[in-house]
Image (cartoon, rainbow, N blue to C red):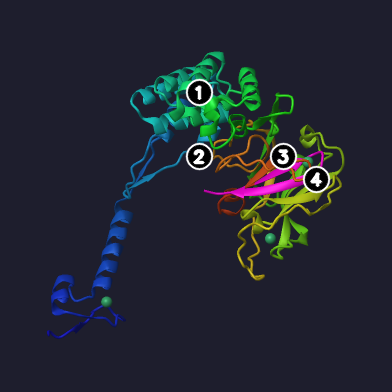
Amino acid sequence: MSERLPCQTPGCQATILPATALRTGGICMPCHQRKLVLAEKAYIEQNRKEVNLYAGVEDPVEILKIMHQPRKYNPLIQEVSYPKTAQELYHQLTESGRERLETYAIALMEEEDWDQAEAILLSLVCFTDTRIGRGLEQLFRKGKYYPAILYKDAGAEIRDRLIELVECDPANRNHLLLALAWTYDEEVVRLFAKWRQSPPEWASELYQAPETYAHEAGWELDAGGGKRLLFHPECYHFKVHRDENKGASTAHTAVMALQTGTQSCPWCGSELTVLFDYDLQNSLVQFMQLPGRRLRIAACMHCNCYGTVFMKADLDGGYEWSEYNIVPDYLPDNEGELEEPVWHSMQLSEHPAGSYESAHWTLEAPASQIGGHPSWIQDADYPACPGCSETMKFVAQMDMEQAEDSEGIYYAFLCRDCLITAVNYQQT
Ligand SMILES: [Zn+2]
Ligand SMILES: [Zn+2]
Ligand SMILES: [Zn+2]
């Protein structure tokens, strides 16, 4: 057996075989690996180039095309990011700009580049509320019926073709039902009501009744077979407030987010959080049509990750744990050692936003908002009111990526007849 030698790195206690020493210049393998990593890092730092793909490009359509292009990771290239987000650029587009992007997306589909085409069409629908007629024609030709939100307000011709297909295309039936729900078409509402009355033969092959697919598009059939919207079209976003000295405008106080509550959670003992604190007298929240002074929607930020939490509220700022709450099947055993969360200060913007800006969460638009369509990460999950069993209306959501650089979204609901609030949570 050959004699082992000490590693030459100062402070390293390892010994090595002479053969290793020959290969590494006298140091042990872990030291050798570390040296290689450091050398590569130094090389990248010295040779990395800044690349600005947007240099000299001023047309927002061209800027967006560049933004949507897939990137190959190259450590030697540091891309200069554009000072505006895609969402902001979409807001700036003129009608002809939107048309050009739709045309571009159609060309991408022709080349089977679905990811890029889909991101552009979704952005047009969600950020600019565009009805993408030509894009849908192309999707249809290619037999692609999702993401279903692309079919929002699709129009009579597309609607009729979807209705035809849903009867005879079992493989795509799930997607077709969702696409139908998103058309928001009165004919579809009547069809869903007809199916509720007498389910079609193929309904037994589905996991849920065909008319309940409407939840994914934010509506349901009411008792009379009409369309009942499950969210408020009016929408205002929260922004992370970084400038501590700036005075709060009236809009900022219409709804305060993430206030520490005055009661503790009976399940885990930690302080409840008032996720949303509405000043019902503020003109900005008049669309809620709630009389009274204040509405506080409270949650347990810990336990709420494992199930829906209901609260009895009044319109004077009061709230209490609801008798209807059922302990979730699983709750972690925290034994009073829960960390106090630290949140960014969130302020409501006074500028109304589109109802669907964050409706498709893969677009990664910041999603903290009151009103608007929820950003479901999983399937739509509107709780049934435990008091009257009506589906509860979505009223607000808090995006934890904005609020504390973590993940997941808390969704808040209200039954205005029973004055019961609910909060649930989803994450990837
Ligand atoms: Zn060593
Ligand atoms: Zn709790
Ligand atoms: Zn109720």
Amino acid, disc 1 = Val
Is 61 or 320 nearer to us in this picture? Answer: 320
Element carrying mark 3: loop
Mark 4 or mark 2: name the one nearer the start of the chain: 4
Give the main secondary structure of the magenta stretch: strand
Give me the residue at 75% from left, 44% from top.
255
The percent coordinates of residue 207 (x first, y second) are 54, 37
Mark 1 or mark 2: name the one nearer the start of the chain: 1
Residue 283 within the magenta-colored segment of the rendering: no
Structural distance between the alpha carbons of marks 4 and 1: 43 Å
Mark 3 or mark 4: name the one nearer the start of the chain: 4
Of the 4 image quadrants, the one containing the N terminus is: bottom left
Q: Which residue is mark 4?
A: 295
Q: Which residue is mark 1?
A: 166
The percent coordinates of residue 38 (x first, y second) are 30, 64
Q: Which residue is mark 2?
A: 362
Structural distance between the alpha carbons of marks 2 and 3: 25 Å
Structural distance between the alpha carbons of marks 4 and 2: 31 Å
Magenta segment, which residues?
A: 411-428
Amino acid, disc 2 = Thr
Give me the residue at 27% from left, 72% from top.
31
Query: Which image quarter: residue 3?
Result: bottom left
* Residue 334 seen in render: yes
Residue contact between numbered discs 1 and 3, judged by CB atoms under 8 Å: no
Mark 1 or mark 3: name the one nearer the start of the chain: 1
Structural distance between the alpha carbons of marks 3 and 4: 16 Å
Amino acid, disc 4 = Leu
Residue contact between numbered discs 4 and 2, judged by CB atoms under 8 Å: no
